[in-house]
Image (cartoon, coloured by chain):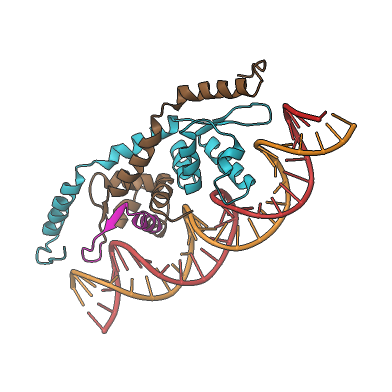
Chain colours: A cyan, B brown, C orange, D red
Amino acid sequence: MSDDELSRTFAALADPTRRAILARLAEGEATVNELAEPFDMSLQAVSKHLKVLERAGLITRGRDAQWRPCRLETAPLETASAWIDRYRTHWSDRFDRLEREIRRVESGQEGHEHG
Amino acid sequence: MSDDELSRTFAALADPTRRAILARLAEGEATVNELAEPFDMSLQAVSKHLKVLERAGLITRGRDAQWRPCRLETAPLETASAWIDRYRTHWSDRFDRLEREIRRVESGQEGHEHG
DNA sequence: ATCATATTCAACCTATCGGTTTATCAACGG
DNA sequence: CCGTTGATAAACCGATAGGTTGAATATGAT
């Protein structure tokens, strides 16, 4: 994986456990143990997932005695969403077919009805 | 990586080369050679990236003689965007601090000014 | 001090990623 | 038929992901 911000964000989101953790955190802060509870894996594994999320800036961790409460941070989600939105609605769906047709005609293969 | 749809989509987006390819495709169809041209890597590497994008449903490939024109498909982007949008604006930013305060008070640690 | 609890660190393992090189397949043009 | 071009397949490689277990650290409670 590359370590630019967008790549880290998307990579962090590319795991169902981590997405579930974020979904949980959207309801409010939670400790590592609380976050780990629903999952059929070791606490350490969840701790690693949290580290990934933290490195991606998707969560921050406070300190409350021996607990490290996790909080969702939305900034990277904004960035990711903005990136996607630049492409999710593009006029090319129609345009592509036109362009494709032009290319076919220009290359003199009008007879190939392959689409 | 898990292979549910969202995971495949986010994983596909977690690479700058693949994002650049999608950005290029947003301007219209392109062949593998055309897509590979800007990158300092082998054609085969780009071909692999395209396979990843295809598996994620982010592109489809046609057949035009020996060319395999690639097209951007927006459906997975919609899904990904929808997932993010559920969490990118959440009321928890303020609420978290309140909840945290409540927890502190309830656990009888009002004196610990650790925030 | 000692013990329990919450969390992290470290070492390890297997599988996958992202790239390479070489070989192969598919389609056109002489 | 043969060569060229576009693209994929296969084998390989080093690095990283995602999990494990076991030890260490930090804080609080007795």
Residue range in magenta is: B48-67
Q: Is residue A3 visible?
A: no
Residue drawn at point x = 63 percent, y = 45 percent: A43
Side of B89 where C27 appears, left or right: left
Give the quadrant of the C terminus of chain B.
top right
Q: Is residue A32 visible?
A: yes
Side of D8 where B26 appears, left or right: left
> Nearest the camera: B108 or B61?
B108
- Residue B95's place in the image compared with C2, above or below, is above
Residue drawn at point x = 48 percent, y = 38 percent: A24
> Nearest the camera: A49 or C11?
A49
Q: Tell me residue B100's x, y (percent).
A: 56, 24
Quadrant of the rendered image containing residue A100: bottom left
- Residue A27's place in the image compared with C18, above or below, is above
- Residue D30's place in the image compared with B20, above or below, is above
Residue drawn at point x = 57 percent, y = 51 percent: A40
Residue drawn at point x = 42 percent, y = 53 percent: B41
Quadrant of the rendered image containing residue D21: bottom right
> Nearest the camera: B43 or A82?
A82
